[in-house]
Each structure stands twice: as structure tokens, then as C-alpha cells.
Amino acid sequence: MFDNLSERLERSFKILKGEGKITEINVAETLKDVRKALLDADVNYKVAKVFTDTVKEKALGQNVLSAVKPSQLMVKIVHDELTQLMGGEAVDVNLKGSPAVILMAGLQGSGKTTFSGKLAKMLKSKRGKNPLLVACDVYRPAAIEQLRVLGEQIGVPVYSEIDSKDPVSIAQNAIKEAKAKGYDLVIVDTAGRLAVDETMMEEIAAIKAAIKPEEILFVVDSMTGQDAVNTAKEFNDRLDFTGVILTKMDGDTRGGAAISILSVVSKPIKFVGTGEKMEAVDQFHPARMADRILGMGDIVSLVERAQEQYDEEEAKRLQKKIAKNQFDFNDFLTQIAQIKKMGNLKDLASMIPGVGKAIKDVEIDDNAFKSIEAIIHSMTPKERANPEILTGSRRTRIAKGSGTTIQEVNRLMKQFDQTRKMMKMVTSSKMGKAMPKMKR
């Protein structure tokens, strides 16, 4: 989402390239461009001014080491200040309480109901919580049904009172239900409006007073830019919320809200939504976001996503098969499924340092694996387990059955053979290093 800002900042730093030292003149020229880049990215103008003034002060106070170029030093200073601007450190969700209560607030269309489900799923799978979702949007029956469907999808129960129009009573009854049935986390989805109005504010303030939540999370659509910051301020003035959730961070947005919100409301961004899938939610890490804004990738988050899908027993089983050169198409399908669970493919690729800029204008279809899966599913169980028996006539049949061409089947076979050989080499190399040297 920060593609344009990243590009503009990179151009700004080029002003210092070739310069022998940092001076007030070249710093002023660079930061003038940086400030324009921030404003174009929809960063609040006061925030942008304070930011560039701070960077200038720090840059002019630095003695440039002979091993460090002025442009490199400027990137370091901007990175550190961006990190501080967005909070400095990641702030975790407060799950104290028996049950812990999280109140979700925000405008209609911000993704509040969907994120309630995502949060429940994440805290259930990663923190071992036993959540209960609560439907307190009494004005839109569709919102109650949406939460019920999401609850079924992620295996989390949903408390609702279809005939009640009193969200305060529903929330209170839901907490009683949680205590009676042993749920240790209650996530309350509230009603939103198309714009901030007094009735909505009074209602959610009444819910807050009645249930005294440990967390009040303000959900905001990052696509709305500066409006997101203004709305956050109005909600914070009334609710004094504890944290912000930015949704739709995978969209084509300028990203200024992420950089501005904390400075305006002094509340941390705790989570970001990175796609439509229920797994597409990340804890917000300011330093990692600064890395991505400056085109440095985010390899730590990429590794964390991979680790979430990592199954130790499956890995051991796979390693044995690879060592014996028995890696087959069933294993290939399993690996594809794990990659798909990690999230949006373009988002994953952009986390690799240097790749984000290279794929800026490249469309990466999340259905890229569909034809591969169709080809493998068109094989018989025997063929999937024994790829070496796939003769020309079998490949022709598979192409017809999968709706692909013989060329696509042959290409997959070639890629599969190369993958198998590479995996065998890597595994053999690791096993060789692990083996102790024999004494003569």
C-alpha cells in the first residue's frame, strides 16, 4: 500500500547521493521533497512538518562517518523517526479479565464485523483463548447474520438476541453467558453509521459504561486517508479507546492514516488487516512498517507467517521422503496449501527485501495455483504417489481432465522434477554437515 510513498522517498534520498557531507542546503532540499512525499501520501500536514523538522535537526547534528554516505545516514534517520512516529514499539492486546472484554467501535463499512471474526480466530489459534462473539448491531439484521456466518466459519459461537433492540442489555447478557459457560474472551461488535452522529456515540458510550471492557479497539478503513484520522479523533474524544485497527492495508491506498493516527490521538495501532481471508491479520510493528515504507522489505513478518503454518511432525515426515527421493505430488499439494494460508501472494512477495519495487506494477493473481492444483487433482492416486509413471498418454489424459494443455502439464512436470532434485540436494547437504566426522 506504500508503493507511491516508497518511490517518492527513494527519489528524495537521491538528492544526497554523490554529496560528500550533509549540509543545511542539501538537507533542506531533500526534506522539502520528503515533506511533499508525505503530504501526497495523505499524512496530516502538521505531522509531516514536525517530522521533517525533527529529521533536519538530527541530520545536521550528525557527524558523517567516512564509511557511511550522507544518503545512507538520511535513510537511517528517516527510518528511526518513522518508527517513532508510528509508535516505536508494538503494543499487544490486553487480555486480562475473566472474561477479558474487547469492545469494537467504528463507522459502518470500516470492516468492523469482519475484523471481530478475524480477531477471535487469531486469539483462539495463537493465544489459546476460548472466545465468544457478540452481535450488538441491532439496526442491521444483515450484520448479525454476517457475524453468525463468520462464527460458524471459524468455529466460534455468537451470542445474539434477535428480538432485542437494546445493545447495552445484549452486551451485559453476553458477559453473563460467557461466565456461565466458561468463555474467557468476549468480543463485542457494535453498530456503526455512515458518519459520526450523537446517537451512535451515546449508545457505544453506554455499552462501555455497562460492560467496562479491557480493550476498546477503534476499527478504521485505511482507504479513507485523512478522514480516518479525523474520525479517530472524534471517537477518541468520546470513548478514550485503547488502540486502533487499520483494515484494508492491502489495498491501493496512500497509507497516510497509518503514519498520522498515533500522532493525532496518541493511541497505538495494534493490528492491521492485510486481506480478505480470515487469517489476514497481523500485529502492527512500527519498525517493520518503516522497513516496508523505505523499500527494505519485512523478512521478519514473512518468517513469522511461515512459522505459523509450520508443522514439526509433517516437516520430519517430508524430510525423510525427500532424502529417499520419494517427494510426490501429494506432498506438493500440501506445500501449496501452506503457502496459500500465509496470505496474499503479492503482499508476501513484497516482504522480501528488494522485491516490492520490482513487482510494483506486476499483477500477481491469488489464483495462480489453480491450474497446478487442477492438473494434480486430475491424476489418479497412483500417479500422484509415483510421478515417474506419467507417460505421454497419461499426461494427455490429465490435460483434458484438468482443462489445461499438454504443454502446461509438461511444464509442471519439469518444474516438479527440478524442485525434487533441489530439495534432495539441500537435504543431503544438511545431513552431511550434521554427520560427525569418522575417526581414522
Image (spheres, rainbow, N blue to C red):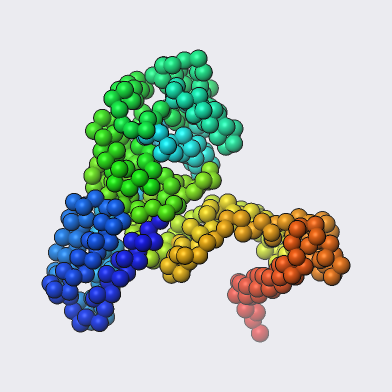
Q: Nearer the viewer, residue 230 or 290?
A: 230
Q: Nearer the viewer, residue 7 or 272?
A: 7
Asked if residue 151 shows in the view, the reply is no
Looking at this view, name the residue that lies furthest to the top.
163
Looking at this view, name the residue that lies furthest to the bottom.
440
Q: Nearer the viewer, residue 31 or 284?
A: 31
Q: Residue 41, image x and y in percent?
A: 31, 56
Picture quarter with the C terminus: bottom right
Looking at this view, name the residue that lies furthest to the right.
393
Residue sitting at x 35%, y 37%: 218
Quadrant of the image occupied by residue 221: top left
Residue sitting at x 18%, y 56%: 49
Q: Residue 60, image x and y in percent?
A: 14, 69
Residue 83 is left or right of residue 323, and the answer is left
Relative to residue 408, is residue 163 depicted above or below?
above
Relative to residue 296, is residue 210 depicted above or below?
above
